[in-house]
Amino acid sequence: MGKLFSEITPEIQEWIENQKMFFVATAPLTADGHVNCSPKGLDSFRILTPTLVAYQDLTGSGIETIAHIQENKRIVIMFCALEGPPKIYRFYGNGEVVFPDSENFLSVSVRFPARIGVRAYILIHLTRIQDSCGYGVPQYDFKEEREVLTKWADVKGEKAVLEYQKVKNLKSIDGLQGLGTK
């Protein structure tokens, strides 16, 4: 069993800021719904306070995380060392979706790189912070960020990306509300 923390310490923050990748996991309430786990990168994660974190949610083909958070708020973020000493941190919490029309969208967005295709920011109000050893995680050397997603959005342009979202991001694979009105 790993160690529990009541908040993100300066040492944890320094370690997190050196990671290039993290994973986001959510699930619907229904037992036959699909659990979702998504890898993330592109300098899209921020620690806002010792108990509040956020990531920049970019346009993609699915909308599972947003749909699950709107249904039940449950979310876990996992960072694991792929370079250096083994370590894993999991941040459990209650998610909040900050859409572009939200009152606090601008105040969150200034913490991140400006990008075309930002669907929302996902805030996580942390309820549990836990580490574990990571002894079974293989080591990899970071080569570079993939730019395919950001280049795709830049080439499409803001208007075409919004149209894409209207087609691909309205409902989750289980039929839960993604983007758009409920």
Image (cartoon, grey):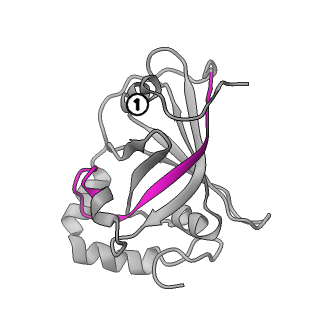
- State how many labels appear: 1
Q: Residue 117: within the magenta?
A: yes
Q: Position of residue 53 (x, y in %)?
A: 45, 46
- In front here: 173 or 125? 125
- Furthest toward the bottom, the residue is 181
> Can residue 11 be seen from the camera position used here?
yes
- In front here: 176 or 126? 126
> Can residue 117 be seen from the camera position used here?
no
Q: In what quadrant of the picture does the N terminus appear?
A: top right
Above or below residue 72? Residue 167 is: below
Above or below residue 18? Residue 53 is: below
Q: Secondary structure at mark 1?
A: loop
- Main SS of the magenta part reads strand
- In front here: 131 or 82? 131
- Answer few, some or many: residues within 10 Å of disc 1's Cα (few below 14, many 20 plus, some between 14 and 19): some
The residue sitting at 40% across, 31% down in the picture is 19
Q: In what quadrant of the picture does the C terminus appear?
A: bottom right
Q: Which residue is mark 1?
A: 19
- Furthest toward the top, the residue is 85
Q: Position of residue 129 (x, y in %)?
A: 59, 36
Q: Amino acid at mark 1?
A: Gln
Q: Position of residue 43 (x, y in %)?
A: 32, 42
Magenta residues, start to end? 109-132
The residue sitting at 73% across, 65% down in the picture is 29
The residue sitting at 46% across, 76% down in the picture is 179
Above or below residue 42? Residue 36 is: below
Which quadrant of the view contains residue 109? bottom left
Above or below residue 171? Residue 4 is: above
Q: Residue 62: within the magenta?
A: no
- Asked if residue 30 lies left or right of residue 4, the reply is right
- Asked if residue 1 lies left or right of residue 5, the reply is right
